[in-house]
Amino acid sequence: MSFDLPRNVILPVDAVDVRLDPGPHPFALDNTEAIAENWQREIAANPALFDGTVVLLSQLAYRDNRLVGRCHAVNYSTFMLWRKRRENSGAEHAYAHAMLVAGDNALVAIRMGSHTVNAGRVYFAAGSFEPVDFRDGLVDVDFNMMREVREETGLDLSDAMRGKRWHALSTNSGTVIFRRYHETAPADEIARRINAFVAAETDPEIEGPVIVRHAADLPVGLSPHMKPLIEWHFSGVD
């Protein structure tokens, strides 16, 4: 199990070759009892949690502008224990962000709902990779991005202009793969659409949209990995 990529620097990514291994993750095999015990504590504190399926990495490397890795499907309960024991666990987390750029160049992020595990946190609409995001065993990053944005905000990004490549930022807490998605509407109009979607949902996952208009416009609750992404966008780098 190896993780070999630069940390705390934004990397250009031309291809993502992360494959789903059908076998169990070693972390899940080694921590069966602890996972079950921790899950009981988690759902006692937050009954809204659902033990669905996400993926955890067992390998990830950066080679010639490519991310190459292997991951395994795990229960969300496994992921929750891993969050507490990630150091020297032999596992890491990767996720994707559609960086939503409005017609006025503002960024449109979201604030997570109070019933979620990331309550109050601000980041671009996103979720962990799931088995549905893989095609013939290979992760489809843009499918995941568009799926999560649609589920959380109601926005359909299928016609939005995409940035020419992905980028990635890897830290000790995980690796985010991101790409600009350009909408023609101004940020206020996009936020109005998201608010209307949230208001119509029975159990919305997010509290609502958050507009970021410049690099110093950092909202309360911003997830730590978001600051370098926002600075990168407003620096004009492509």
Image (spheres, grey):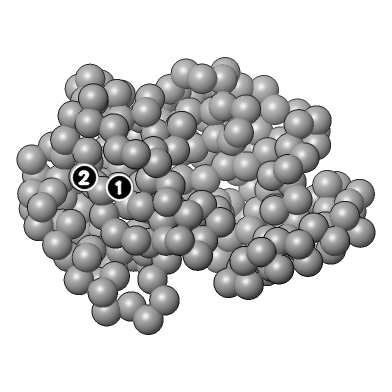
Disc 1 and disc 2 in contact, CB within 8 angstroms: yes
**Distance from Cα at disc 1 to Cα at disc 2:** 6 Å
Q: Position of residue 53 (x, y in %)?
A: 65, 64
Residue 167, how many percent across, how many down?
Answer: 41, 31
Depth check: give the residue in front, 148 or 187.
187
Residue that appears at 30% across and 24% down: 232
Residue at the spot 58% in from the left edge and 60% down from the top edge? 130
State which quarter of the image contains the N terminus.
Answer: top right
Q: Which mark is residue 211?
A: 2
Residue pushed farthest front?
45
Q: Is residue 102 above or below residue 175?
A: below
211 with respect to 179 (left or right): left
The disc labelled 1 sits on which kind of residue?
Ala
- At numbered mark 2, what does the secondary structure look like: helix, strand or loop? strand
Per the rendering, the mark at residue 237 is none
Disc 1 residue crowd, few under 14, some 14–19, many 20+, Cα 10 Å: many
**Which residue is pictured at 30% across the width and 47% down the height?**
109
Estimate the x, y position of residue 29 in percent, counting from the top left.
89, 53
The image quarter containing residue 2 is top right
Q: Is residue 16 visible?
A: yes
Residue 125, horizontal then vertical, whole percent: 37, 53
Q: Earlier in the sequence, mark 1 or mark 2?
A: 1
**Residue found at x 91% / y 59%:** 33
Q: Quadrant of residue 10?
A: top left
Horizontal relation, residue 94 to residue 107: left or right: right
In the shown orientation, is residue 96 left or right of residue 110? right
**What kind of element bears circle 1?**
strand
Q: Which residue is mark 1?
A: 109
